[in-house]
Image (cartoon, helix red, strand yellow):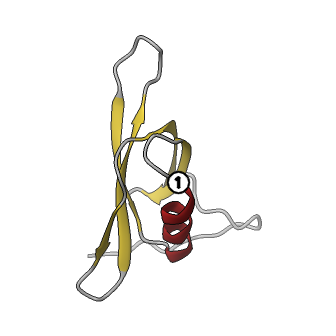
Amino acid sequence: MFLRTQTRFFHATAKKMDFSKMSIVGRIGSEFAEHTSANNNRYLKYSIASQPRRDGQTNWYNITVFNEPQINFLTEYVRKGYVFFFFAIFMVV
């Protein structure tokens, strides 16, 4: 397996084709489910319901959070039914 080397430019952003961005505005659709992985790392699972148009079909997204400060914030301040803005940057493989 050959790994592609990362090339960074002066403004320190990755190549355009390496990453994708996603933003969702919707409501928290489920209670938070906190889990622990085999190597003892916490993670949180929940879903977001988003409706692009008032008369359109509801889209459901399953979200998994591995970042400890984000897990703490979500479990302390956010509840099912809250309107939520979700933004993610992820690598396309």
Q: Identify the image quadrant of the N terminus.
A: bottom left
Is 39 positioned to the left or the right of 83 in the image?
left
Q: Residue at x 45, y 40 (%)?
A: 81
Residue 77 falls left or right of residue 12: left
Q: Quadrant of the C terminus?
A: bottom left
Q: Front-most of 89 and 78?
A: 78
Q: Nearer the viewer, residue 41 or 75?
A: 75
* Residue 61 drawn above or below residue 45: above
Could you tell me which residue is drawn at 47 percent across and 58 percent down?
90
Height in image: 66 above or below 20?
A: below
* Percent position of residue 7, x then y: 59, 70
Q: Is residue 19 above or below residue 1?
A: above
Q: Is residue 37 visible?
A: yes
Secondary structure category for the residue under label 1 = loop
Q: Residue most toward the top? A: 55
Q: Residues within 10 Å of mark 1 (few under 14, many from 20)?
A: some
Q: Is residue 93 visible?
A: no
Tell me: 34 left or right of 11. Answer: left
Amino acid type of the residue tagged 1 in the rendering: Val
| Direction bottom: furthest residue | 39
24 above or below 88?
above
Residue marked by disc 1? 78
Residue 27, given in percent of the width and then of the height, sits at: 47, 38
Image point (43%, 25%), residue name: 51
- Residue 86 picture location, percent across and down: 53, 47
Q: Nearer the viewer, residue 24 or 28?
A: 28
How many numbered callouts? Answer: 1
Query: Residue placed at 35% from the left, 52% from the top?
Result: 31
Outermost residue, left side: 38
Q: Position of residue 28 (x, y in %)?
A: 43, 44
